[in-house]
Amino acid sequence: MKRIKKIWAFILFDTYGNIALASFIICIVSGFILAVPYNVQAAYDSIALMLITNLPGIIFRNMHYWSAQIFLIFTLLHTWEHLKLRSAVDTGSGVWLRLVVSLMVLFFVMIYGFILKADVDSLQARRILETLLSDIPFTGKLMSGILFGNKDSFQLIYVHHIATATIILVFIIFEHAKVLWSKRSTFLITLAVITLLSFFIHAPLHNNINPVLKGPWYFVGFQEVLHWMEKPAWIWMFLILFLFFLFALKYVNENKNHLAVWFILFLSAVYLVLTIIGFYFRGENWEWQSPCGKNKYVKSVSLEIGFQKVSSRFAHLTAYDIPVVQGRREACMNCHTGLTGFSPSHDPKAIGCTSCHLGNPFTLDPGKAHKNMVLIPGNLANANISCGTTSCHPEISERINTSMMTTNSGIVSVDRFVFGENHSPDILSHIKDIGHSAADKHLRDLCAKCHLGNEKLETGSVDQMTRGGGCTACHLNYTRSGVDQHFAYISGQKIEELLPSIHPSLDINISNDHCFGCHSRSGRISTNYEGWHETLFDEADVIGQTNYRILQDKRVFEFISADVHHELGLECIDCHNSYEVMGDGKNYFHEEQAVKINCEDCHFSEIPETISYKELETEQKKIFDLRKFGHTDKKMIVGKNFGLPLINAFYENEESYMITKNAQELHLLSPPANVCTKSRVHSKVSCSACHTTWAPQCIGCHNEFDKEAQGFDLLENKFVKGEWVEYVGTFLAEPPTLGVREDDKTQIEPAIPGMIMTIDKGSFYSSDESIIFHRLFAPAAPHTTSVNGRSCKSCHNNPLAIGYGRGMLIFEINNGVGKWKFTPEFAENKYDGLPEDAWIEFLSNSSDDFKSSDEYSRSTRTDFRPFNIEEQRRILRVGACLSCHAENSEIILKSLDEDLESYLLKISGDCVLPVGF
Amino acid sequence: MKISRKDFIKHFWGIILLPYVLLLILMERKHNQVLKQKVIRIPAEFSGTVNFVDEVICIRSNKELKIYSSKCTHLGCRINKTHQGVLVCPCHGSSFNLDGKVLTGPASKNLTELNFVHDKETNEIVISI
């Protein structure tokens, strides 16, 4: 204990009061000097300018800051000392009253200093104090006006800081201590300590981007208290009571004083705890946050440590040389000169560098400038502080969290359903919330990379291997030269001379390549659209063959036929809009619910609903303008089901047109064929059911867990032990099976074998759990549209279309009795006895069991099913007709205009219909 | 009772200052009155549902436009963002729904709704605060 006291005595080279006085003198002098560069009319800018260009100014600012903090701390310690020694008893009541009140003045002069830096922390602190004062009955508004002045000006605050409060403090110090000058040695030691601190630890200035807002450290505990108070004006009562309590100590005896001192010590300890909580455990929106939390960018603005190292080439910079962007100095651009490649909206001249990359814009020291920088802005983890800040795209960064491409809801819920972990495939889910069950591990091993929340960790362009990346997934574009420069830099020594001079562009020129990485998997709509079908070949198998394409991941694709829209030059974004891709703020179970475009929106025979340019909502108008569309005078077509305008499609002179968004090519939109619109009997058949040429189909898949294999957790991007291995059966590219969607309307849609598979759950849990077998088909939008629809027979006489699987379906007539006969091509599956590729059993009532229980589920949706027995019979009844009559025969064409039942009453006596139909 | 001039000044010097205090109050009121009114003009069309401009929050839901003061009713901090579809105060975490109603404290009062006019000539919303 004695040793500690000795050390303490050595550190405390003089009394608390004398050190406080020395600090006060240094504070006044440094403040006087600071008045030279400080401009009260442009407070924030003048400090930023000083931080960037004026090293001596930085030192004086730091000295002013540190001397003020030391003055505050030692004044409080000095007060504590006096309370312990009961000095109040020997002090005149007037003097004691003024001393007690001066504590308030002390805090006011400190907070004035904090406000005068005029960053967002300061502005909010000012608003809080003004409101607190205004809430005082009768005199509040007057006091607020007198103490803070006009809300857009710092003039009065500056006057009170440098004059009013300082004069009061000088007066009180003199009255109390009878001196205005500390001992020379005390002054010099204090000056040395403050100078040393000022060289290495810099006073903070908020960059106005970090969303965490906090008051000065000595008010953070106060901020925490206010957080719990519904009526914060009561805080004045507590403060007045506390001051009264201090004043009353003059009149109490020694025992009571002793108790009071302990009480103050207790209050101080509580306040210290509150301060620590407020500073380290409160984050954005004053929510709880771990001090070791992942997001290093969203932390309290803290003191910069380290000496400033600035290159001599900046010695002659003037205020005009340092750009001001969005009211903020951006010294970054003084080093990073000559960069090109930006889109106009994201040019640093318009938004600066820190709007996206954060870092410290107020220094020319590269080490400090790059601290806490975001290398790749736009990842969803940092979107709220980069792309999504209030002045940029706040609403999009919110609603993108509901995008199907962020949540993967359908993928997660269907996977869990298949593994028996969900009772339904329609449960709202989010890929970021998956755990480590068998199903979730399956997702982690095979699927969890393709979502927008997957962080892009390396710079470079979006290619076939890119997954996720938030905003960059779609909006990042490199020029050819940009790619070359980037490659030269990262493959070399990463030396300054090789730093790319072309910055990637962030724009709305979204190509099919942006979608390709993720959408060349699962439903494979990106590859389908371009006509490519995945095979089980290796690269070596197809060398020299022109009909094959090898992707970056070495998968081999065979050319089948491209979608007609692709052949005409349409890209993904020509149909799919921002509200589909980036979400519309609503959560959906499955992807088809989030899609807002339908074939009928472009292909119609009636006069469409239209909207003028003026009536467009701002986001649509902004996209329209950015694309430099010229049809501002045209009537734009409004989508039928969702009422969303198609900004690149318009109606004029009884014709409809579409302009491709990137290439700006004009296309005439053709109306649907007569057979599509006039035929009553096919009114429930969706366009894609007929016009889909082929769909990728995977049959006979087995999943087994290999405990010893080294897996890769796609969600967390790390290697792990054990992984699910998928053994693929057969890949086929053929016209899809058809199924029935029953939501608000009944519609026939394409279906593909979503999961005809077995899962060995026992291999995961090391248990005797039996193998799970599923025969689930999924509704599909294969994106292989052709101009001509399917033939009649391709549905009515096709076992694959009806759901029986591949094979021979024949209508046999023996002795005037007609009977359908089906011989499957694939062998029976040992688990359910159906042909491997079938959806349902041939003409069996069992298909009606759909949805009766989980066990009998037939599809990956609760509103999608195979044809029931009655529907199969109706299809095959027409199929029987088509066995004899040609598709384009008069008798068949006439049947399209009538109800089938009444039409069949008129058939010839020679016709034979299937028995029992 | 006789009172000396010295004693009078000692005990009642505050009375001498009173007219000056009154003058100060009048001056501050006049000053406030002169500078109080501020007119904000913002484009009538804006992207999405919520738009933060200057000291106001514009909210368009179901094609109806409402303008609220961005001043948090707890302590006056400026609300300048939404989080998961609600307006959140950055200082103490009070949250309000898009009808300006308090969802979570510490604020206990709803946001102040402001009157506005639509200037059709310039297609701007004009708000006086």
Image (tube, rainbow, N blue to C red):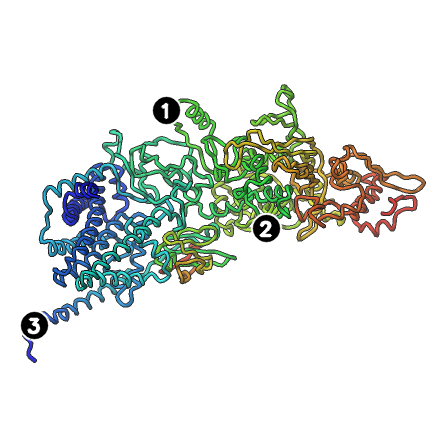
The quadrant the N terminus of chain A occupies is top left
Q: Return the residue nearer the eye: A668 or A547.
A: A547
How far apart in space, not on screen, are marks 1 and 3 (Cα)?
Answer: 84 Å
What x and y, as percent, mark residue A649?
57, 44
Q: Which chain carries label 1?
A: A
Q: Name the residue tied to disc 1.
A: A495
B115 is higher (above) or lower (below) than A630: below
Asked which quadrant contains residue B104, the reply is: bottom left
Amino acid type of the residue that numbered disc 1 sits on in the rendered structure: Ile
**Sequence-wise, which precedes: disc 2 or disc 1?**
1
Closest to the camera, between mark 2 and mark 3, is 3
Question: Mark 1 Cα within 10 Å, few/some/many (few <14, many 20+)?
Answer: few
Q: Residue furthest front?
A: A1
How far apart in space, not on screen, are marks 2 and 1 (Cα)?
Answer: 53 Å
Question: Mark 3 Cα within 10 Å, few/some/many (few <14, many 20+)?
Answer: few
What x and y, as percent, mark residue A856?
72, 46
What x and y, as percent, mark residue A821?
84, 38
Q: State whether residue A848 appears in this view.
A: yes
Q: Which chain carries label 2?
A: A
What x and y, as percent, mark residue A254?
18, 60
Asked which quadrant contains residue A436, the reply is: top right
Would residue A186 appear left or right of A547 to someone viewing this image? left
**Mark 1 and mark 3, same subunit?**
no
Query: The residue tagged with tag 2: helix, strand or loop?
Result: loop
Residue A642: assigned label: 2
